[in-house]
Image (spheres, rainbow, N blue to C red):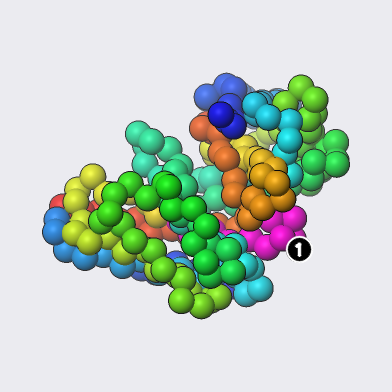
Amino acid sequence: DAGVIQSPRHEVTEMGQEVTLRCKPISGHNSLFWYRQTMMRGLELLIYFNNNVPIDDSGMPEDRFSAKMPNASFSTLKIQPSEPRDSAVYFCASSRAGEKYEQYFGPGTRLTVT
Amino acid sequence: KQEVTQIPAALSVPEGENLVLNCSFTDSAIYNLQWFRQDPGKGLTSLLLIQSSQREQTSGRLNASLDKSSGRSTLYIAASQPGDSATYLCAVIYNAGGTSYGKLTFGQGTILTVHP
């Protein structure tokens, strides 16, 4: 399996622009997680889905953040409008109950908002 | 509040030493516990997963133990090498009436440096 795939790997954008991060989970996994990691705050869970349904979005910092999972093989995290404090590495991860929910992470998207 | 704590925050050892990283969790009702490794600028790599019914798991030079009653796990690294230098994170799936969906609660990590 190719593992969890994220795109783009790096994104540099100006404040106020819309940013869309993409994730393809491992085939057969039915739980998907979006995280954000910064030096100051460490690893934060933003939102997670089960069977394409959002379960808990309490970690989403503001209404500027939104996430969708239109099907089992694709999810997006959108920031609109972006701000410099959104600069971070965003990770997507997936897991499956049949695999004891062992979670596998993607390589991350490094976002820089100037 | 369900939390995970890792001690120490950082550890520096000479090559060849055996070492132990500690993880504690506040609620013994866990589904499983997972240890990850993160290299600088990279994603997280799963090292070992221990189910709540298990006491330990081993992979090569790594051994992870679980003691639910005391709320502790340890990651033992034998004969450490400079290539082991990374951040090690412990994460727990807490039971939530059987509907956790695999949500992990992470510790803050231990930064390990193994010098030649």
Type of residue at label 1? Gly
Q: Is residue A55 above or below residue B91?
A: below
Percent of width and height locating residue B91: 62, 40
Residue ID at (45%, 42%): A43
Residue A15 to residue A24: above or below: above
Residue B57 in the image, given as x and y percentages of width and height: 82, 42
Q: Quadrant of the C terminus of chain B?
A: top right
Q: Is A111 on the left-hand or right-hand side of A34?
A: left
- To which chain does the residue with label 1 belong? A
Crowd band around label 1 with a 10 angstrom C-alpha radius: few (<14), some (14–19), many (20+): few
Looking at the rendering, the stretch of residues picked out in magenta corresponds to A91-101
Query: Which residue does the image show at 63% across and 60% down from the upper left?
Result: A95
Percent x, y of residue B63:
78, 37
Q: Is residue A114 in sight in this rendering?
A: yes
Is residue A12 visible in this depiction of the protein?
Answer: no
| SS class, disc 1 | helix
* Circle 1 residue: A98
* Residue B12 in which image quadrant: top right
At a point 37% along the width and 50% down the height, the residue shown is A60
Residue B110, percent from left and from top: 55, 30
Foreground pick, B93 / A22: B93
Q: Is residue B96 left or right of residue A60?
A: right
Q: Nearer the viewer, residue A45 or B50?
A: A45
Position above or below: B99 against A8: above
Q: Please tell me which residue is depicted at 68% across the width and 63% down the height of the picture.
A: A96
- In the figure, is residue A8 to the left or right of A18? right
